[in-house]
């Protein structure tokens, strides 16, 4: 019996690793053979066309002052940009890096503090009773309202900006983690107790994996609000960063640069969300394979 | 390895082995004495179980039938340790399990197989089966894996040990769940309408499967259902419960020989027992139906 089991063991494991790569290829093929990618490209083209027509071709009222796609693109890829920001200028990457680094610090801190806090709140009802009202009162306060206190609290602008970014992420992460624990079906806790789980087993083997899907939804939201608060913070009190770049370009009447920074923000935001989804799918193989 | 050698071998599922070869029951006698349970949501005093007394011998397959929502599950939950009782006592092997003042602690000696299944979706089949012995500290992860792979092999589940519960059929899931319970070697197996949501074909396969497990292990089984045919086919003892509050209306000793297979269903004795049970249940079903009508009116 034993050797047979060992053999089938290996085969199964191999199958699993092959199938997860195969699954990605299969899904990509399926995606390409569907109408989705073409609709996506068509939609994008239609948007850019409308943008071009409104701003540069017809120069409609309300749109005439806005930079059109042709101007923006020309500036963006220029070796010698009129306003000093393009993919060939080091400043562009300094702004991106500053923003990215601030978001990462805030996001990591919010995750490291928010996830355990949320897990604990969901797991221990008494602890939740203490903390939940505070969380619920602080959470709806818009991040911009925190700006004066953030400046009073922290020496220097850098820490104040990171603090604002962190706060937004922290509330989103904590609340979603809490919801995640509360979403776990009672039957799993009962089954665990039947099988002789001690409280720490329940925590590590039921509470954490059971809450993971919500935690990752929370992390995506957290990443989104982190960028939101960051740009707000940088606009008010920055020296570098994409938010600062947008505001500064507005003041200096360098309008194409505003759009360049905005599109860059959109792209980085989308990439960071995709990265979180990717990590989530690695940690939640059962979800990926259930859908397959 | 947690399981004593040979305590669970299902390598002969044809049913041709003799009952004498089965492992004799050693433990798992349940005594339910004058148990009542009153729920008190908003002072409404709903009586779910009323003065139930029942003796279930070690290694006996006891099936409780009754209308849906009659309080059968309350009794099971009290034995499992999920609920308290309002009066009376429940003993397991003459040791007090729960009483009015003492709620039973859930433990691996009484494992529940739930109505809608409770395999952890984040663990593979193998990880689900080993988690009992591992957390109980009975064996290392490596030993438990070997034991579980062997057990799952005997259960005809070797092909799916690395799959997640979400990837396999409901019948397979329920078999894995029974394997997960059996590997901890419990005294009592508590099943709460485990085959309720299954189609008739899957259900009949599951019946045969459960009977094989029972014949080989002779664990005490406390099984809840509202399906009479299922009850008689499986049980040593069918307990007909009244509609809410649950009282014991009738106990039918099922003397059909074991090991059983589907031929039993065509015997005269099976039909007699079924008629006896139908008589008892029908009256209660009518009462439950009328009570339901009144509630809706």
Image (cartoon, grey):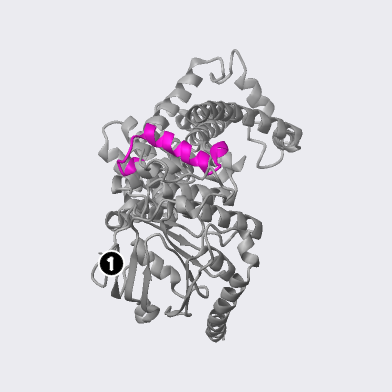
Q: What residue is shown at x 55% (from left), y 84% (from top)?
A: B283
Give the chain letter at badge 1.
B
Crowd rating for badge 1 (residues with CA inside 10 Å; few <14, some 14–19, many 20+): many
Residue A168 vertical placement versus B43 (above, below): above
Q: Is residue A241 left or right of residue B160?
A: left
Q: Which residue is mark 1?
A: B98
The magenta segment is: B134-160
In the image, B55 versus B178, the foreground residue is B55
Pick the quarter of the image with the C terminus of chain A: top right
**Quick check: is B153 in the magenta stretch?**
yes
> Considering only vertical position in the picture, is B108 above or below B97?
above
Dominant SS of magenta comes to helix
In x, y percent, where is residue A225? 46, 41
B190 or A282: nearer the viewer:
B190
Residue A46 visible somewhere in the drawing: yes
- Residue A155 in the image, given as x and y percentages of width and height: 26, 32
Residue B266 among those drawn in magenta: no
Residue A144 visible? The answer is no
Residue in the image at 40% along x and 44% along y? A173
User: Where does residue B221 sit, x and y in percent of width and height?
Assistant: 43, 60
A188 lies above or below B3? below
């Amino acid at each position: 019996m034993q050797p047979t089991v060992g053999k089938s063991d290996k085969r199964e494991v191999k199958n699993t690793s092959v199938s997860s790569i195969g699954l990605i290829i299969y899904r990509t093929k399926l995606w390409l053979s569907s109408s989705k990618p073409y609709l996506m490209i068509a939609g994008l083209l239609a948007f850019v066309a409308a943008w071009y027509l409104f701003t540069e071709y017809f120069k409609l009222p309300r749109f005439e002052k806005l930079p059109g796609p042709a101007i923006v693109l020309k500036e963006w890829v220029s070796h010698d940009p009129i306003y000093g920001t393009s993919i060939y200028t080091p400043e562009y990457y300094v702004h991106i890096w500053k923003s990215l680094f601030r978001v990462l610090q805030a996001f990591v801190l919010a995750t490291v503090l928010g996830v355990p806090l949320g897990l604990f709140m969901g797991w221990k009802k008494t602890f939740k009773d203490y903390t939940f009202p505070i969380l619920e009162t602080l959470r709806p306060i818009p991040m911009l309202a925190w700006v004066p206190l953030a400046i009073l609290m922290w020496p220097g602008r850098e820490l104040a900006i990171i603090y604002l970014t962190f706060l937004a992420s922290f509330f989103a992460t904590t609340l979603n983690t809490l919801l995640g624990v509360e979403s776990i079906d009672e039957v799993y806790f009962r089954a665990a107790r039947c099988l002789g789980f001690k409280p720490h087993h329940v925590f590590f083997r039921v509470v954490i994996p059971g809450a993971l899907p919500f935690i990752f939804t929370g992390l995506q939201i957290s990443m989104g609000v982190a960028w939101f608060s960051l740009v707000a913070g940088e606009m008010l009190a920055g020296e570098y960063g994409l938010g600062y770049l947008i505001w500064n370009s507005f003041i200096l009447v360098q309008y194409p640069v505003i759009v360049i920074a905005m599109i860059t923000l959109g792209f980085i935001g989308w990439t960071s969300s995709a990265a979180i989804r990717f990590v989530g799918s690695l940690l939640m193989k059962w979800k990926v394979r259930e859908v397959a | 390895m947690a399981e004593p050698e040979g305590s669970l071998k299902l390598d002969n599922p044809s049913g041709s082995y003799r009952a004498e070869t089965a492992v004799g029951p050693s433990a798992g006698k349940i005594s339910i004495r004058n148990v009542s349970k009153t729920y008190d949501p908003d002072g409404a005093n709903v009586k779910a179980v009323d003065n139930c007394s029942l003796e279930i011998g070690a290694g006996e397959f006891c099936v409780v039938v009754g209308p849906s929502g009659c309080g059968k599950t309350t009794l099971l939950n009290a034995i499992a340790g999920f609920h308290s009782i309002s009066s009376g006592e429940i003993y397991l092997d003459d040791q007090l399990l729960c009483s009015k003042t003492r709620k039973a602690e859930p433990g691996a000696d009484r494992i529940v197989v739930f109505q809608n299944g409770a395999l952890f979706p984040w663990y593979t089949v193998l990880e689900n089966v080993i988690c009992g012995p591992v957390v109980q500290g009975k064996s290392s992860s490596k030993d438990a894996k070997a034991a579980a792979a062997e057990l799952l092999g005997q259960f005809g589940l070797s092909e799916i040990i690395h799959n997640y519960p979400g990837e396999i059929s409901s019948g397979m899931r329920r078999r894995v769940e029974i394997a997960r319970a059996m590997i901890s070697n419990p005294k009592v197996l508590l099943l709460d309408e485990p085959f309720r949501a299954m189609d008739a074909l899957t259900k009949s396969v599951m019946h045969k499967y459960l009977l094989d497990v029972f014949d080989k292990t002779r664990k005490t089984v406390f099984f809840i259902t509202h399906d009479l045919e299922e009850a008689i086919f499986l049980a040593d003892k069918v307990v007909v419960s009244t509609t809410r509050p649950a009282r014991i209306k009738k106990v039918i000793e099922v003397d059909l020989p074991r090991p059983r297979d589907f031929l039993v269903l065509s015997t005269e004795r099976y039909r007699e027992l079924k008629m006896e049970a139908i008589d008892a249940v029908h009256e209660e079903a009518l009462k439950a139906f009328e009570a339901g009508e009144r509630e809706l009116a």
